[in-house]
Amino acid sequence: MARLPRLVLANYPHHIIQSGNNNQPIFRADEDFRQFLVWLKESARECKVAIHAYTLMPDHVHVLATPAAADALARMMQRVGRHYVPWFNAKYARSGSLFQGRFKTALIDPPAYFMLVSRYIESNAVRSELVSDPLHYPWSSYPHHAGVRSDALITDHALYWALGNTPFQREAAYIELSRPALSQADLARIDAAVLKGWPLGSEQFKAELQQRAKRQVLPAKRGRPFKVKPADAA
């Protein structure tokens, strides 16, 4: 079955995952993380993509971002790769691909899932048991949202601003929102959407997207179609 093109629409947030080839590390030292973030920031600005949240894990990257144009996410990720991969290969005397094919993405229904995906991304290091508190992981946007340090890479989404009237209120609300661990159902839903490339939202949201995009955005139903409608088969 032919692979569907990515579903990317301007002015919607998207959850992006880029993994290392064969799950190999794509960051080996602090300098690697820092250099990747430099090129991500430059590429986001150049391609007009707003980055709302991120986590850089040793072997993969999560980003929550809104593109100004449908092709902006691909241009941004390609630009990062054109800079980072040759730099990484030269540094570690290696050759060949670093990333596992094209990045994966899921378009998000903001009111229903934006905050959930932001929490999912920023708690990744905790779930992977690299740290016990997201504040202790330096390669994430959580310290920015918690008010510990300002991150110039981040463009806060309107839903984050709606958490409070002052920075202190927003930061306190976000910390409180992030305290509970995500449920297994939410984790599975987010994982399935981004890995399969399906939008993350209500059935109504998906149906509206299908109308707007004029292409399939819902998983096809399994099984062969009925030659006779079930209601008429009796």
Image (cartoon, rainbow, N blue to C red):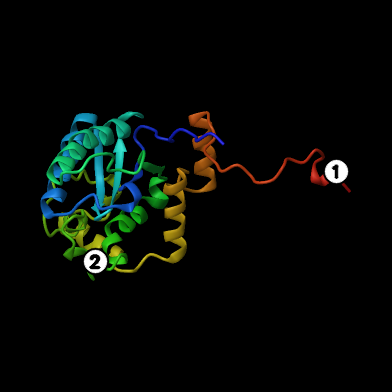
Callout 1: SS: helix
Residue 223 position, x and y percent, is: 69, 45
| Residue under the point 17% across and 54% down | 28
Residue 118 position, x and y percent, is: 31, 53
Residue 20 position, x and y percent, is: 30, 48
> Can residue 68 be seen at all in this image of the molecule?
no
Residue named by callout 2? 130
Number of marks: 2
| Residue under the point 19% across and 60% down | 146
Compared with residue 131, is residue 204 higher up or lower down, i.e. above or below?
above
Ranked by sequence position, the earlier of labels 2 and 1 is 2
Where residue 175 sits, quadrant-wise, is bottom left
Residue named by callout 1? 232
What residue type is disc 1 on?
Asp
Q: CA distance from mark 2 to mark 1?
A: 58 Å
Residue 137 position, x and y percent, is: 18, 62
State left or right for residue 234 relative to residue 219. right
Compared with residue 182, is residue 105 higher up or lower down, i.e. above or below?
above
Which label number is shown at residue 146? none
Q: Residue furthest right?
A: 234
State left or right for residue 110 relative to residue 142. right
- Nearer the observer: mark 2 or 1; the answer is 2
User: From the image, which quarter does the N terminus lie in?
Assistant: top right
State left or right for residue 143 relative to residue 198. left
Where residue 101 sits, quadrant-wise, is top left
What residue type is disc 2 on?
Leu
| Residue under the point 26% across and 62% down | 125
Mark 2 is surrounded, within 10 Å at the Cα level, by few (under 14), some (14 to 19) or many (20 or more) other residues, namely few
State left or right for residue 147 relative to residue 117. left
Mark 1 is surrounded, within 10 Å at the Cα level, by few (under 14), some (14 to 19) or many (20 or more) other residues, namely few
Compared with residue 7, is residue 166 higher up or lower down, i.e. above or below?
below
Callout 2: SS: loop
